[in-house]
Amino acid sequence: MRVPTRITAAAAVLALAATLAACGADDEVTTGDGAGDVATVEPATPSASPPLDGEPAGTVIPGVAGTALAQAGSTVAVLGTDGTVRLHTAPGAADTPPPRATDVTDVAALTADGDGFLAASPARLSRIGADGAVTQIAGEQGPVLSVAVTDDDRILVGTDDGHLRVLGRDGELQRDIHDFVRVDEILVAPASSEVAGQVVVVDRAQSMVAPIDIDTGERKASLRAGNGIAEATVDSYGRILATGTADNELLGFYGQPIVMRFRFPVSPGPYALTWDDTQQLLWVSTTGDNQAIAYDLSTGEPRERGRIATVGQVSAMTADPDTGILYVLSERGDGLQAVPRNTPDGAR
């Protein structure tokens, strides 16, 4: 994700520091002094996609380029490469209306939030309603990389200088946990899982998955995730599923304490992934050949169940929990792809 400029990001960090000082930055609010002198790797990036060879599956809404997707009800929010957010109603349907622009800019992270969305930028944290209305929740956030919502309705914001911030629904800062190099993704296990509410941070610079107690700021036992973790998601069981683009592999983690359950070869260039709760399948995009693969994890090890052709340079995917429609987003502008569920076995 992007921040506008180094100067703007630095100004945001200074402003946030002043805010923390005004709040009385003490042990009740702040935790940690940064990651310290730790070994790092170059943060993973997706493999380059070749030109499209044939038609992608399903329906493609042309002219869409973005870096993140989020879904709430029938609305799919797309974070564009220009830092704006547009709302698509039932994309791919025959009678869908044109996408709606929203009044947010410089957005770096996006997530679903009930019947709407949360959009985080260096300057502010905002809620976007399904009707496109924007409400500011909090001000300066610094160089944002990620945002998430907990089961008890708190908001988590991660930055590229290693902060995980815990905010109330009113935007009040509850805790600032500074224990990472970067907070690229924040994963929250669903309430229905055996690890309900578990919060896991993905730090690409350390290629690490790290469970964190957001109430105390304590980081639990963390694990190295291959040689370059890229994207990650959490499934309905609370498993952390991640792509290791550098080594062409899929990684699985689970438990309290967290342990690695599998390392499975996936080629070429696994990157974006999403859990399809309707069919209990994990979808993994491979940007090296413009495909997405469906995996059944019911035995504990990935088993391929189907493949589809995708748009190029896939940056994000999400699956509608009600209809099973798979949405696939291209970063290079090939469009937003909607792939309906046609068969019960995931072949689509």
Image (cartoon, rainbow, N blue to C red):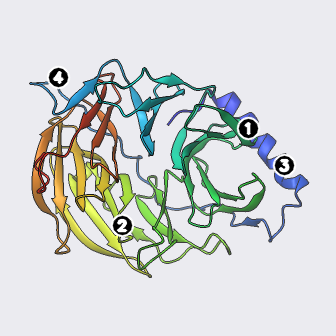
Between the C-alphas of marks 2 and 4, the distance is: 34 Å
Residue 324 horizontal/vertical position (percent): 27, 49
Between the C-alphas of marks 3 and 1, the distance is: 10 Å
Which sits earlier in the primary sequence, circle 1 or circle 2? 1
Which sits earlier in the primary sequence, circle 2 or circle 4? 4
Say which residue label 1 marks: 12
Q: Residues within 10 Å of mark 4 (few under 14, many from 20)?
A: few
Is residue 265 among what the camera can see? no
When the figure is inspected, residue 258 is found, relative to residue 99, above or below; the finding is: below
Say which residue label 4 marks: 51
- Pointers 4 and 1 in contact (CB under 8 A)? no
When the figure is inspected, residue 311 is found, relative to residue 243, above or below; the finding is: above
Say left or right for 218 vs 20.
left
Which residue occupies 53% across, 33% down? Answer: 2
Q: Dot 1 lies on which element? A: helix
Between the C-alphas of marks 4 and 1, the distance is: 39 Å
* Number of numbered callouts drawn: 4
- Kindly identify the amino acid type of the residue bearing the numbered disc 4: Pro
Which is more foreground, mark 4 or mark 1? 4
Which sits earlier in the primary sequence, circle 4 or circle 1? 1
Q: Which of 33/91 is in front?
A: 91
Q: Dot 4 lies on which element? A: loop
Label annotation for residue 19: 3
- Kindly identify the amino acid type of the residue bearing the numbered disc 1: Ala
Say which residue label 2 marks: 236
- Kindly identify the amino acid type of the residue bearing the numbered disc 3: Thr
Q: Dot 3 lies on which element? A: helix
Q: Dot 2 lies on which element? A: loop
